[in-house]
Image (cartoon, rainbow, N blue to C red):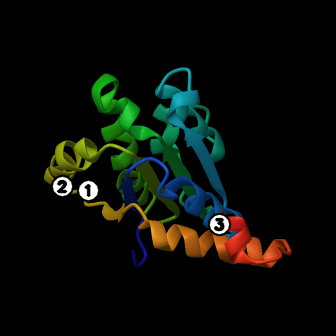
Amino acid sequence: QGNSSGCLHISGMPGTGKTALVRDVMRERLDEHMYMNCVGLSHPQEAAHRVAAALNVPDVSALECLSTSRRHSLVVVLDEMDLWLHTHRDMLYRMFCLPKLLYARTQGAVRLALIGIANSLDLTEQFLPVLRSQGVSPSVLHFSPMPADEVQALLWTHVDRHLTWPSRTSVEV
Protein backbone atom coordinates (compact mmCIF):
# COMPACT_ATOMS: atom_id res chain seq x y z
CA GLN A 1 0.00 0.00 0.00
CA GLY A 2 2.10 2.85 -1.24
CA ASN A 3 4.88 3.71 1.18
CA SER A 4 3.23 2.34 4.31
CA SER A 5 2.85 -1.03 5.94
CA GLY A 6 -0.36 -2.93 5.49
CA CYS A 7 -2.46 -5.94 6.27
CA LEU A 8 -4.21 -8.51 4.15
CA HIS A 9 -6.90 -10.82 5.49
CA ILE A 10 -7.44 -13.99 3.44
CA SER A 11 -10.49 -16.09 4.18
CA GLY A 12 -12.20 -19.10 2.67
CA MET A 13 -13.28 -22.66 3.20
CA PRO A 14 -10.62 -25.23 4.11
CA GLY A 15 -8.89 -26.72 1.08
CA THR A 16 -9.34 -23.75 -1.24
CA GLY A 17 -5.60 -23.16 -1.55
CA LYS A 18 -5.11 -20.12 0.67
CA THR A 19 -2.03 -21.34 2.48
CA ALA A 20 -0.53 -23.02 -0.60
CA LEU A 21 -0.78 -19.85 -2.64
CA VAL A 22 0.66 -17.61 0.07
CA ARG A 23 3.56 -19.99 0.70
CA ASP A 24 4.34 -20.17 -3.03
CA VAL A 25 4.32 -16.39 -3.32
CA MET A 26 6.52 -16.02 -0.24
CA ARG A 27 9.06 -18.48 -1.68
CA GLU A 28 9.30 -16.33 -4.80
CA ARG A 29 9.72 -13.02 -2.97
CA LEU A 30 13.05 -11.55 -2.07
CA ASP A 31 11.71 -9.73 1.01
CA GLU A 32 12.34 -11.14 4.41
CA HIS A 33 9.30 -13.03 5.58
CA MET A 34 8.17 -15.37 8.31
CA TYR A 35 5.36 -17.91 8.34
CA MET A 36 3.64 -18.91 11.57
CA ASN A 37 0.77 -21.33 11.98
CA CYS A 38 -1.23 -20.22 15.00
CA VAL A 39 -2.09 -23.83 15.83
CA GLY A 40 1.59 -24.63 16.33
CA LEU A 41 2.38 -21.71 18.62
CA SER A 42 2.50 -22.48 22.32
CA HIS A 43 0.91 -19.09 23.07
CA PRO A 44 -0.13 -16.18 20.83
CA GLN A 45 2.49 -13.97 22.51
CA GLU A 46 5.09 -16.19 20.82
CA ALA A 47 4.12 -14.65 17.46
CA ALA A 48 4.90 -11.15 18.74
CA HIS A 49 8.21 -12.35 20.17
CA ARG A 50 9.18 -13.88 16.84
CA VAL A 51 8.37 -10.62 15.05
CA ALA A 52 10.48 -8.69 17.58
CA ALA A 53 13.38 -11.13 17.10
CA ALA A 54 13.14 -10.78 13.30
CA LEU A 55 13.40 -7.00 13.75
CA ASN A 56 16.42 -7.43 16.07
CA VAL A 57 14.79 -6.13 19.25
CA PRO A 58 14.80 -8.03 22.55
CA ASP A 59 11.03 -8.14 23.04
CA VAL A 60 7.75 -6.67 21.95
CA SER A 61 7.92 -3.75 24.36
CA ALA A 62 11.21 -2.68 22.75
CA LEU A 63 9.57 -2.25 19.35
CA GLU A 64 9.03 1.42 20.16
CA CYS A 65 12.81 1.83 20.40
CA LEU A 66 13.50 0.66 16.86
CA SER A 67 16.07 2.73 15.08
CA THR A 68 14.86 4.88 12.23
CA SER A 69 18.32 4.87 10.66
CA ARG A 70 18.11 1.24 9.54
CA ARG A 71 15.44 0.37 7.04
CA HIS A 72 13.75 -2.98 7.50
CA SER A 73 10.92 -4.75 5.70
CA LEU A 74 9.23 -7.88 6.95
CA VAL A 75 6.23 -9.86 5.74
CA VAL A 76 4.53 -11.87 8.51
CA VAL A 77 2.07 -14.63 7.64
CA LEU A 78 -0.28 -15.81 10.39
CA ASP A 79 -2.05 -18.96 9.23
CA GLU A 80 -5.06 -20.49 11.00
CA MET A 81 -5.52 -17.22 12.86
CA ASP A 82 -9.23 -17.88 13.39
CA LEU A 83 -8.08 -20.08 16.27
CA TRP A 84 -7.36 -16.87 18.20
CA LEU A 85 -10.71 -15.23 17.48
CA HIS A 86 -12.39 -16.66 20.57
CA THR A 87 -9.42 -17.37 22.83
CA HIS A 88 -6.93 -14.53 22.24
CA ARG A 89 -8.80 -11.83 20.35
CA ASP A 90 -6.72 -9.06 21.98
CA MET A 91 -3.50 -10.55 20.58
CA LEU A 92 -5.05 -10.77 17.14
CA TYR A 93 -5.95 -7.06 17.30
CA ARG A 94 -2.43 -6.17 18.43
CA MET A 95 -0.84 -8.13 15.60
CA PHE A 96 -3.02 -6.41 12.99
CA CYS A 97 -2.31 -2.98 14.49
CA LEU A 98 1.44 -3.59 14.61
CA PRO A 99 2.23 -2.63 10.97
CA LYS A 100 0.62 0.80 11.33
CA LEU A 101 2.21 1.34 14.74
CA LEU A 102 5.73 0.43 13.59
CA TYR A 103 5.45 2.54 10.47
CA ALA A 104 4.41 5.56 12.51
CA ARG A 105 6.98 5.09 15.30
CA THR A 106 9.89 4.65 12.90
CA GLN A 107 8.79 7.31 10.38
CA GLY A 108 8.52 4.61 7.73
CA ALA A 109 11.92 3.02 8.36
CA VAL A 110 10.29 -0.24 9.43
CA ARG A 111 7.71 -1.62 7.06
CA LEU A 112 5.78 -4.62 8.26
CA ALA A 113 3.13 -6.37 6.20
CA LEU A 114 0.82 -8.83 7.91
CA ILE A 115 -1.04 -11.53 6.01
CA GLY A 116 -3.66 -13.30 8.08
CA ILE A 117 -5.19 -16.53 6.79
CA ALA A 118 -8.41 -17.94 8.26
CA ASN A 119 -11.07 -20.49 7.39
CA SER A 120 -13.78 -18.84 9.44
CA LEU A 121 -16.01 -16.24 7.89
CA ASP A 122 -16.87 -15.18 11.46
CA LEU A 123 -13.47 -13.57 11.60
CA THR A 124 -14.33 -11.28 8.71
CA GLU A 125 -17.71 -10.34 10.16
CA GLN A 126 -16.64 -9.90 13.80
CA PHE A 127 -13.03 -8.84 13.58
CA LEU A 128 -12.68 -6.44 10.68
CA PRO A 129 -15.26 -3.86 11.84
CA VAL A 130 -13.41 -3.51 15.15
CA LEU A 131 -10.07 -3.08 13.35
CA ARG A 132 -11.55 -0.47 11.03
CA SER A 133 -12.86 1.46 14.05
CA GLN A 134 -9.22 1.62 15.24
CA GLY A 135 -8.02 2.99 11.89
CA VAL A 136 -6.68 -0.30 10.55
CA SER A 137 -8.33 -1.40 7.31
CA PRO A 138 -6.91 -4.67 6.04
CA SER A 139 -7.44 -5.58 2.43
CA VAL A 140 -9.66 -8.64 2.16
CA LEU A 141 -9.28 -11.56 -0.22
CA HIS A 142 -11.86 -14.33 -0.16
CA PHE A 143 -11.08 -17.74 -1.67
CA SER A 144 -14.16 -19.46 -3.06
CA PRO A 145 -14.22 -23.22 -3.54
CA MET A 146 -13.36 -24.30 -7.07
CA PRO A 147 -16.11 -25.93 -9.13
CA ALA A 148 -15.53 -29.62 -9.91
CA ASP A 149 -14.80 -28.97 -13.59
CA GLU A 150 -12.03 -26.50 -12.69
CA VAL A 151 -10.49 -28.96 -10.24
CA GLN A 152 -10.59 -31.66 -12.91
CA ALA A 153 -8.96 -29.36 -15.48
CA LEU A 154 -6.26 -28.37 -13.00
CA LEU A 155 -5.54 -32.01 -12.15
CA TRP A 156 -5.35 -32.95 -15.81
CA THR A 157 -2.93 -30.09 -16.48
CA HIS A 158 -0.68 -31.39 -13.73
CA VAL A 159 -1.02 -35.04 -14.79
CA ASP A 160 -0.38 -34.24 -18.46
CA ARG A 161 2.74 -32.28 -17.53
CA HIS A 162 4.27 -34.99 -15.35
CA LEU A 163 2.96 -38.36 -16.49
CA THR A 164 2.17 -40.21 -19.67
CA TRP A 165 -1.24 -41.86 -19.75
CA PRO A 166 -2.69 -44.12 -22.46
CA SER A 167 -5.85 -42.02 -22.58
CA ARG A 168 -7.96 -39.82 -20.32
CA THR A 169 -10.95 -42.12 -20.53
CA SER A 170 -8.95 -45.03 -19.15
CA VAL A 171 -7.98 -42.95 -16.17
CA GLU A 172 -11.48 -41.56 -15.60
CA VAL A 173 -12.85 -45.09 -15.34
Q: Which amino acid type is shown beneath numbered disc 3?
A: Glu
What is the distance, in whole Å, between disc 3 and disc 1 at their CAs? 49 Å
Give the percent coordinates (x, y) of residue 63.
Answer: 49, 42
What separation in Å lies between label 2 and label 1 (alpha carbons)? 5 Å
Q: Which residue is mark 2?
A: 132
Q: Which mark is residue 172?
A: 3
* Count of picture labels: 3
Answer above or below: position of 49 versus 118. above
Locate the C terminus and report the quarter of the image it occupies.
bottom right
Q: What is the three-letter code of the residue carrying label 2? A: Arg
Report helix, strand or loop for mark 3. helix
* Contact? badges 2 and 1 (CB < 8 Å): yes
Q: Give the x, y percent position of residue 8.
A: 39, 60
The one nearer the camera, 81 or 30, is 81
Query: Of helix, strand and loop, which one carries label 2?
Result: helix
Q: Pointer 1: what residue?
A: 136
Residue at 86% from the left image edge and 75% from the top image edge: 164
Q: Quote the CA–CA distance across marks 3 and 2.
A: 49 Å
Judge the density around disc 2: few (<14), some (14-19), many (≥20) Cα neighbours within 10 Å: few
